[in-house]
Image (cartoon, rainbow, N blue to C red):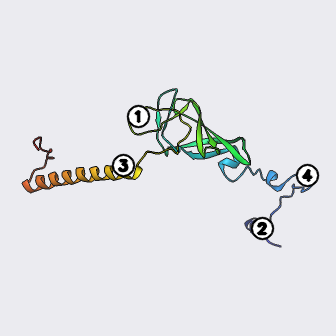
Amino acid sequence: MSTLSAARADNFYYPGEWDPSVESLKKVRRHKGRNQYETRGVIRLEIPFHCWCAACGRHIAKGTRFNAKKERAGKYHTTSIWRFAFGCSCGERLGLRTDPRGRDYACEDSLRRRLGKCGDEFEEVGDALSRGEDDVGANRLARRSFRAKRKAEDALEAEAKRLGLAVELLPSACP
């Protein structure tokens, strides 16, 4: 006969008050689940796009993480539609729902979505997969301008170092 600690280490210990015909072993051990989704239906959600809270106007950046309540909201053919409910710092309830038909997410409650470039107005949209005309060209132009700016800044820094200055030089106003 092995000791009690050895039996528990091997997971073969059954409490004396347990009757398998009445209740499960998990219920006797007060097992509530392995993670927060199994215990409370809460998951860690990362926002898939830029949006904002309509109640307080707070911008919520893409990739911001929230603890969200996950619940089934229906079905589209055989695919489940999931609803994620979470809160803003102002106390307003925000919601996000999967949209299998549009292969996207739909905003609910006080959550509003932004589509477009920086400076554009926020708007509610249905198709987030619509992209610009020439994404590759726009990316190439942005990288080229950033490289030119960085090269000019490096040249000014090298000039200041050559002159022995401890201050940052500004670009010349004359071309």
Residue with the mark numbered 4: 22
Q: Position of residue 175 (x, y in %)?
A: 11, 44
In what quadrant of the picture does the N terminus appear? bottom right
Give yes or no for contact between labels 2 and 3 (Cβ–Cβ under 8 Å): no
Q: Nearer the viewer, residue 87 or 17?
A: 87
Lateral position of residue 165 relative to residue 52, left or right: left
The local crowd at label 1, few if under 14, some if 14 to 19, many if 20 or more residues have their Cα within 10 Å, is few
Q: Separation of disc 4 and disc 1 at Cα? A: 63 Å
Q: Separation of disc 2 and disc 3 at Cα? A: 66 Å
Which residue sits furthest left? Answer: 163
Q: Position of residue 71 (x, y in %)?
A: 69, 41
Task: Kindly identify the amino acid type of the residue bearing the numbered disc 4.
Answer: Val
Among numbered discs 4 and 3, the one appearing first in the sequence: 4
Residue with the mark numbered 1: 120
Q: Position of residue 7 (x, y in %)?
A: 78, 67
The local crowd at label 3, few if under 14, some if 14 to 19, many if 20 or more residues have their Cα within 10 Å, is few
Task: Kindly identify the amino acid type of the residue bearing the numbered disc 2.
Answer: Ala
Among numbered discs 3 and 1, the one appearing first in the sequence: 1
Q: Separation of disc 4 and disc 2 at Cα? A: 23 Å
Res 25 → quadrant: bottom right
The local crowd at label 2, few if under 14, some if 14 to 19, many if 20 or more residues have their Cα within 10 Å, is few
Residue with the mark numbered 3: 138
| Residue visible at 44% across and 39% down in the picture | 116
Specify the label residue 168 is tagged with: none
Lateral position of residue 100 relative to residue 88, left or right: right
